[in-house]
Image: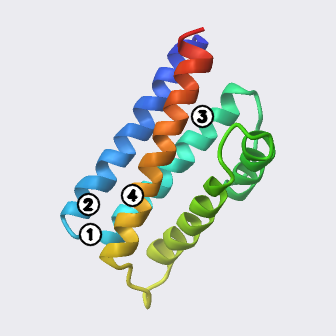
Amino acid sequence: MSEKELVKEIIEKFKERIEAAELLLKDKKFEDSVSRSYYALFDAVRGLLELEKITAKSHRGAITKFHQHFIKTGIFDIKTSKTIARLIKLREEADYTFQTEISKAEAETAFKDTKKFLMAVENYLNKNYLNK
């Protein structure tokens, strides 16, 4: 697969997940919406790392490497760290805890912040990989 094909595949994958998050949000399935928002973000992170030939063995490892290579270097805004940390916490609560209920507001914020991040990633990918 060529680099450009990989970039298109990455974008397609995270768009598919964020669309699912939106549908679940509209259907008031807030926990599942949060999970899809997280995985849309995570797919973008994994894709960026793969393009840079950076490997990670776990979700946390991928997030750590993303911070090192994309946030600390100023490629993505430092606010992204807070978005990622909040999404990790919400996703873990949604997927693994019976006692926690994700609110509509939390799911909407997760969706909105993820969508904003994905737009930044797509702009970065277009600028650095598709339009060079």
Crowding at dot 2, Cα within 10 Å, few <14 / some 14-19 / many 20+, comes out as some
User: Do residues under tags 1 and 2 come within 8 Å of each other at their CB atoms?
Assistant: yes
Q: Earlier in the sequence, mark 4 or mark 3?
A: 3
Measured as percent of width and height from the top left, residue 119 is found at 46, 38
- In the shown orientation, is residue 4 left or right of residue 24? right
Q: Is residue 11 depicted above or below 111 in this figure? A: above
- In the shown orientation, is residue 29 left or right of residue 45? left
User: Do residues under tags 4 and 2 come within 8 Å of each other at their CB atoms?
Assistant: no
Q: Earlier in the sequence, mark 4 or mark 2?
A: 2
Q: Name the amino acid, label 1.
A: Lys
Which residue is tagged 4?
A: 111
Q: In which quadrant will I find the N terminus?
A: top right
Q: Mark 4 to mark 3: distance in Å?
A: 19 Å
Residue visible at 62% across and 53% down? Answer: 80
| Residue 110 image label | none
Crowding at dot 1, Cα within 10 Å, few <14 / some 14-19 / many 20+, comes out as some
Crowding at dot 3, Cα within 10 Å, few <14 / some 14-19 / many 20+, comes out as many
Q: Secondary structure at mark 2?
A: helix
Q: Name the amino acid, label 2.
A: Leu
